[in-house]
Amino acid sequence: MELSARNSLAGTVKAVKLGEVMAEVIIQVGENEIVAVITRSSAERLKLSVGDRVFAVVKATEVMVAK
């Protein structure tokens, strides 16, 4: 699979919290966590579970930098 997004961060699923419509997926990327909110059906289709190796793919029109 190829994507147009340039920012892809490899990580491990730390938690999956399923709601009625949406799912919150917490991904451990090094010492940091990324939280993604996706549809419940996508989480179920991907069969996401704790310990899975995944990629957090970021495609945004804006990225803020703070120092």
Image (tube, rainbow, N blue to C red):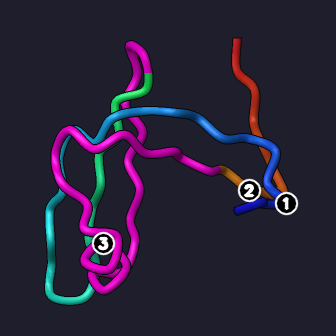
- Which residue is located at x 82 percent, y 45 percent? 6
Say few, some or many: other residues with alpha carbon within 10 Å of mark 3 (under 14 / 14 to 19 / 20 or more): some
Q: What element carries label 2?
A: loop
| Residues at marks 2 and 3, CA–CA distance in whole angstroms | 19 Å
Of circles 2 and 3, the one toward us is: 3
Q: Where is residue 27 in the image (x, y as percent from the top left)?
A: 35, 40
Q: Which of 46 and 31 is in front in this view?
A: 46
Say which residue label 2 marks: 59
Residue 42 vs 29, above or below: the answer is below
Stretch of the chain drawn in magenta? 30-57
Say few, some or many: other residues with alpha carbon within 10 Å of mark 2 (under 14 / 14 to 19 / 20 or more): few
Q: Which of 25 and 43 is in front in this view?
A: 43
* Disc 2 + disc 1, Cβ < 8 Å: yes
Say few, some or many: other residues with alpha carbon within 10 Å of mark 1 (under 14 / 14 to 19 / 20 or more): few
* Disc 1 + disc 3, Cβ < 8 Å: no
Q: Is residue 41 magenta?
A: yes
The first of marks 2 and 3 along the sequence is 3
- Which residue is located at x 29 percent, y 55 percent? 25
Q: What element carries label 3?
A: helix
Say which residue label 1 marks: 4
Q: Where is residue 12 in the image (x, y as percent from the top left)?
A: 33, 35
Q: What residue type is labelled 3?
A: Ala
Residue 39 picture quarter: bottom left
Q: Does the magenta stretch include residue 64?
A: no
Say which residue label 3 marks: 43
The first of marks 2 and 1 along the sequence is 1
The first of marks 1 and 3 along the sequence is 1
Q: Residue 63: which numbered mark, if any? A: none
